[in-house]
Image: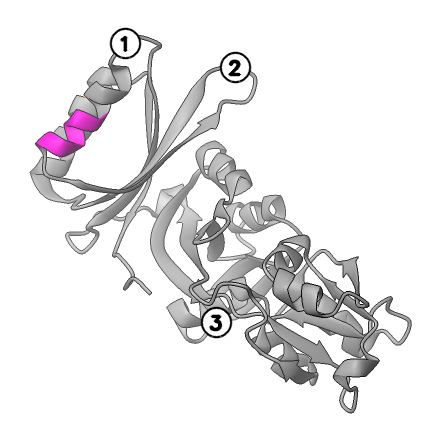
Amino acid sequence: MRVAVQGEPGCFSHAAALGHFGVLTLVPCRDFVSLFEAVLDGRADRGCVPVENALAGAVTENLDLLVRSPVTAVGEAYVRVEMCLAVRPGTRLEDVTAVGSHPVAFRQCRRFFDAHPEVEEVVAYDTAGSIRDLMMDPDVAWNGAIGPALAADLYGAETLERGLEDHPRNFTRFLVVARASEARRSARSPKASLAFTLPHRPGALHDALGVFADAGLDLTRLESRPIPGRPWEYRFFADVRGASGEGWERTLHALHARSDDVRVIGRYPEAPAP
């Protein structure tokens, strides 16, 4: 299975893909747009796409890409986000003067930087990439890097500290996507992700949510995003448990009657909650 991820080998998306597939061929992508393109043009069989973090919330760029792209969600995965301080072997903590990583990783490790105000933060495009560059580029602008332990192991870095993140209950949820033409119906797909729009009228959202309540379906997530090019109009994203059988089809029919546009992003087996 060829799996596209955003980031370098060893990134958290790589860890999510390994947890979901076990054995795979990784297709690293520079950004999320490239990830979706790799799936659509056949360079990858699947993509592993982060959609929300337990602390930072939704990955909004990917919500928009899921609606715009002809892909379907066929699975989900969770990853425990543990930040490690990686260095070249033999480097001591007191020798670390600059740390490279992604800005989101820096925001999740404020206690470390509060305790070491002398350490400079240097922005890199990827957590795993910052560790790779540390080990492969002698002229890189940092002598420490924050990222996954998987990346430190892959690139031969030494891990000085683990658990740098401020909140230990830090998880990221991923959707596994395939080309829309590969969509499969299955009784073993009790969870669904969908997006819908509503008219501007009193009670529109109440009526739409009532569709799920009447069917006894559990909404595990609901949020809204602005619709590009349509100021002050919004698209709602929802995750639903119990999305199978005739009850689910009736629910979709009722939602279509209340919504301007309904897009089922995918139906898939629910991953065990962390």
Residue to which mark 1 is pinned: 202
For the point 66% across and 59% down, which residue is it? 106
The image's mark for residue 230 is 2
Task: Identify the element where label 1 is drawn.
Answer: loop
Q: Depth-wise, is mark 2 or mark 3 nearer the camera? A: 2
Question: Magenta includes 234?
Answer: no
Q: Which residues are magenta?
A: 209-214
Q: Relative to 266, is 159 above or below?
A: below
CA neighbours of label 3 inside 10 A, class few (<14), some (14 to 19), many (20+): few
Query: Residue 28: x percent and y percent?
Result: 62, 61
Q: Quadrant of the C terminus?
A: bottom left
CA neighbours of label 1 inside 10 A, class few (<14), some (14 to 19), many (20+): few
Q: Main secondary structure of the magenta part?
A: helix
For the point 44% across and 65% down, which residue is it? 79
Residue to which mark 3 is pinned: 24
Residue 44 appears left or right of 178: right
Asked if marks 1 and 3 touch (Cβ < 8 Å), the reply is no
Q: Depth-wise, is mark 1 or mark 3 nearer the camera? A: 1
